[in-house]
Image: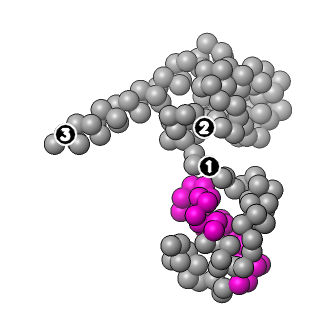
């Protein structure tokens, strides 16, 4: 099923596990179970061992990301400016903890180390947009902006489906 990914790897060479997992994740955005089973057969490594490796390295995801990724900076400058409170506000508003994706798959909430905008701490970014000097009162507005995008797309998809 995922043989196109394996084409340039020699079979049964266990040293290629990380590289293969990275390729799978580049394609799907996470590591689907079916792909891990194919990797297991291709390399001759048990699925449970592959899960062990995938969960050890935090670069790998076992679940798909949401449509929008919200990253809360937890670097020192942002920490001093109370980024923990911003994170808590986002967790409360979205109903998920850091590292999780909302049920509607619209948002994934993550924390990151310094994202290089310390002068405007506390900072969050959503996809490619950066928000500085964020306050709790800004959170609902920021979320709404991306939720609205999603609703507009749903409307467009519905209209396209009716045509
Ligand atoms: S510590 Fe948050 S941007 Fe640098």
Q: Position of residue 103 (x, y in %)?
A: 55, 34
Disc 1: which residue? 63
Q: Which residue is mark 2?
A: 101
Q: Mark 3 to mark 2: distance in Å?
A: 30 Å
Query: Which residue is nearer to you in this view: 15 or 46?
Result: 46
Where is residue 9 drawn, in percent x and y? 63, 83
Closer to the chain start, of discs 2 and 1, is: 1
Identify the element where label 2 is drawn: loop
Total residue callouts: 3
Residue occupying the point 75% across, 20% down: 85
Q: Secondary structure at mark 1?
A: loop
Q: Tell whether 14 sits left or right of 9.
A: right
Q: What residue appears at the point 69 percent right and 39 percent down from the top-left corner?
A: 99
Q: Nearer the viewer, residue 87 or 81?
A: 87
Dot 2 and dot 1 residues touching (CB under 8 Å): yes
Q: CA distance from mark 2 to mark 1?
A: 9 Å
Callout 3–callout 2 Cβ contact below 8 Å: no
Q: Residues within 10 Å of mark 1 (few under 14, many from 20)?
A: few
Q: Write down the region rendered in magenta.
A: 12-37
Query: Which percent across, then down, holds residue 147?
Result: 46, 28
When asked about the image quadrant of residue 56, the answer is bottom right
In the image: residue 149, left or right of residue 136:
left
Up-down relation of residue 125 to residue 23 (above or below)? above
Instruction: Give the overall secondary structure of the magenta segment.
Output: helix
For residue 18: magenta?
yes
* Spatial CA span between label 3 and label 1: 31 Å
Tell me what residue is drawn at x 79 percent, y 60 percent: 52
For mark 3, does the 10 Å Cα neighbourhood hold few (<14), some (14 to 19), or many (20 or more) residues? few
């Amino acid at each position: 099923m995922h043989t196109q990914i394996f084409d340039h790897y020699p079979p049964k060479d266990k040293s290629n596990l990380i590289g293969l997992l990275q390729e799978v994740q580049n394609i799907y955005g996470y590591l689907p179970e079916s792909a891990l089973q194919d990797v297991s057969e291709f390399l001759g490594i048990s699925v449970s061992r592959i899960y062990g490796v995938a969960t050890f390295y935090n670069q790998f995801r076992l679940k798909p990301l949401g449509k929008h990724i919200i990253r809360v900076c937890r670097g020192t400058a942002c920490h001093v400016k109370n980024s923990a409170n911003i994170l808590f506000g986002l967790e409360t508003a979205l109903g998920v903890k850091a590292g999780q994706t909302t049920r509607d798959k619209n948002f994934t909430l993550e924390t990151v180390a310094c994202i290089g905008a310390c002068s405007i701490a506390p900072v969050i970014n959503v996809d490619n947009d950066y928000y500085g000097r964020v306050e709790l009162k800004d959170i609902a507005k920021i979320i709404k902006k991306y939720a609205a995008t999603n609703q507009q797309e749903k409307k467009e998809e519905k209209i396209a489906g009716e045509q």
